[in-house]
Image (cartoon, helix red, strand yellow):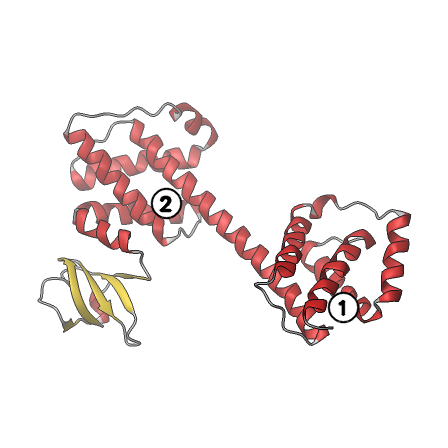
């Protein structure tokens, strides 16, 4: 790996074998004057596609604070069974540095929701308590008790972000799979920038949200569904395939009311493609 710019003694901007820029961490990799080659065995971890403000932050944070923060994130990941996103390490590191600087200035900020965090998030509070002890052990800095809750809150928020991303990925996967079914069965390419597609996606997202409370179709809706099937027979087989997919993924069988709305949205999509 080629170092093209040093950030500090242990952090450098590098180019990998595919010429992609990467931020690399490793003991002493930033000692030499760039550019130069560094062995992969010297690199502990890497970050791709970092936003500029994170790179700027690396210039401000002490190396020992970065190291102890990474150790705390590793401990938290193993203890909570969560793989945190890369931004979490930076935000926690920035917070710990901020807390240490405040302590040096004699500023101690209280945490008004410490008791609530303690009762509702016991594991995160224990992790925050461990982190404060670990910081004292590694940096000889004894942070105030309120920091146990503050660090615990960071882990609570980081878990929420991981969950939200997983839910977002599931939704996007669900929508894309159904779009693929439409494209394959109707032999079209759906314009994903079209407003009709946006409405179709919105309907699918609402379908996901209320999947646990889909009600039986009314008789009038069933008649309307049958009427539309007669009018648009080319969509009937397609809707049946979508129904099978939804049943397999959501473990519910959509009624004719849901299928009717999907059919109308799909018909609009097909109409935009001249079908």
Disc count in the image?
A: 2
Q: Residue at x 60, y 62 (%)?
A: 194
Q: Quadrant of the N terminus?
A: bottom left
Mark drawn on residue 138: none
Q: Secondary structure at mark 2?
A: helix
Q: Position of residue 265 (x, y in %)?
A: 72, 59
- Residue 178 visible in the picture: yes
Which residue is the site of mark 1? 238
The numbered mark, 1 or 2, whose residue comes first in the sequence reads: 2
Q: Nearer the viewer, residue 200 or 20?
A: 200
Residues at marks 1 and 2, CA–CA distance in whole angstroms: 47 Å
Q: Position of residue 189 (x, y in %)?
A: 63, 73
Q: Secondary structure at mark 1?
A: helix
Which residue is the site of mark 2? 76
Q: Residue at x 38, y 26 (%)?
A: 114
Q: Position of residue 142 (x, y in %)?
A: 20, 31
Q: Quadrant of the C terminus?
A: bottom right
Q: Residues within 10 Å of mark 1 (few under 14, many from 20)?
A: some
Decide if residue 206 is on the left or right side of residue 78: right
Q: Residues within 10 Å of mark 2 (few under 14, many from 20)?
A: many
Decide if residue 148 is on the left or right side of residue 253: left
């Amino acid at each position: 790996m080629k170092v093209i710019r040093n950030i500090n003694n242990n952090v450098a901007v590098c180019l990998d074998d595919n010429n992609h820029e990467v931020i690399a961490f490793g003991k002493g990799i930033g000692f030499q004057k760039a550019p130069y080659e560094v062995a992969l065995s010297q690199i502990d971890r890497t970050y791709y596609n970092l936003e500029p403000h994170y790179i700027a932050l690396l210039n401000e944070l002490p190396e020992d604070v970065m190291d102890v923060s990474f150790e705390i994130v590793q401990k938290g990941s193993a203890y909570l069974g969560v793989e945190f996103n890369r931004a979490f390490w930076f935000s926690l590191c920035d917070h710990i540095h901020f807390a240490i600087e405040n302590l040096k200035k004699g500023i101690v900020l209280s945490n008004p929701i410490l008791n609530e965090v303690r009762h509702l998030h016991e594991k995160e509070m224990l992790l925050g308590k461990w982190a404060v002890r670990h910081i004292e052990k590694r940096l000889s800095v004894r942070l105030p008790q309120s920091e146990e809750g503050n660090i615990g809150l960071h882990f609570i928020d980081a878990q929420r972000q991981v969950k939200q991303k997983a839910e977002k990925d599931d939704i996007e996967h669900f929508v894309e799979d159904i779009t693929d079914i439409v494209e394959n069965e109707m032999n079209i390419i759906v314009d994903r920038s079209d407003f009709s597609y946006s409405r179709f996606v919105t309907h699918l997202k609402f379908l996901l949200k209320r999947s646990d409370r889909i009600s039986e179709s009314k008789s009038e809706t069933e008649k309307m569904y049958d009427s539309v099937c007669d009018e648009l027979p080319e969509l009937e087989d397609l809707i049946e395939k979508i129904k099978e997919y939804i049943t397999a993924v959501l473990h519910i069988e959509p009624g004719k009311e849901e299928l009717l709305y999907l059919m109308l949205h799909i018909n609009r999509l097909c109409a935009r493609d001249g079908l």
